[in-house]
Image: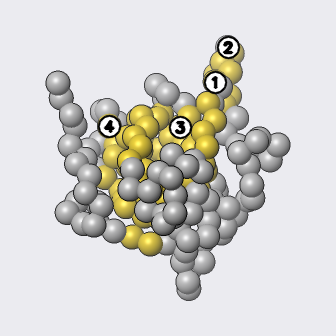
Amino acid sequence: MEGVWQKELKIIPDERGKLMEFLRSDDDIFRKFGQVYITTVFPGVVKGWHAHQEQRDYLGCVWGMIKLVLYDGRDNSPTQGKFREYFIGEQNPLLLSIPPGVWHGFKGIGTKEAIIINCPTLPYDYLEPDELRIAPHGGKIKYDWDRQDG
């Protein structure tokens, strides 16, 4: 999707445990730091849709698994109106850089609560948040969050 960047995350194990670098200021995808926060989602629960007008999100799942879905709602984008799905977490460590104007949401998949880290480029403004929201089911964005068996 236009303007979305990804970084494969490398797990470095040793006899003490594991280390995984998430985001570095010298990464090609890094632009700016605002804050870091952690959110969780239970299996089968959907959090979304939301988008930003100014900030870029650097989002990854470090425990469990999620289906992260992007929808390009930007005017004049070559990928306008398109969806992109990513399955990220312990089985597929990946960091996504999501630009302003791209709607995103995620669903917990698997059998345990998933832990997501986000490093947006702006700190959260409690008085005037840079956040747009749409209901995940039955709203303007027509996406079926159900599992696709086959």
Image position, residue 128 (x, y; %) = 55, 83
Mark 2 or mark 4, which has the lower sequence index?
2
Image position, residue 91 (x, y; %) = 46, 25
Q: Is residue 18 above or below residue 37?
A: above
Q: In the image as oriented, which residue stretches furthest toward the top?
A: 15
Mark 3 or mark 1, which has the lower sequence index?
1
The residue type indicated by label 2 comes to: Glu
Q: Which residue is mark 4?
A: 109
Left or right? Give the position of 40 relative to 30.
left
Cα distance, mark 3 to mark 1?
11 Å
Residues at marks 2 and 4 touching, judged by CB atoms closer than 8 Å: no
Q: Which residue is mark 3?
A: 62
Element class at badge 1: strand
Q: In the image as oriented, which residue stretches furthest toward the left?
A: 150
User: Residue placed at 66% from the left, 67% from the top?
Assistant: 122
Q: Quadrant of the C terminus?
A: top left
The residue type indicated by label 4 comes to: Ile
Element class at badge 2: loop
In this rendering, the label closer to the viewer, 2 or 4:
4
The residue type indicated by label 1 comes to: Ile
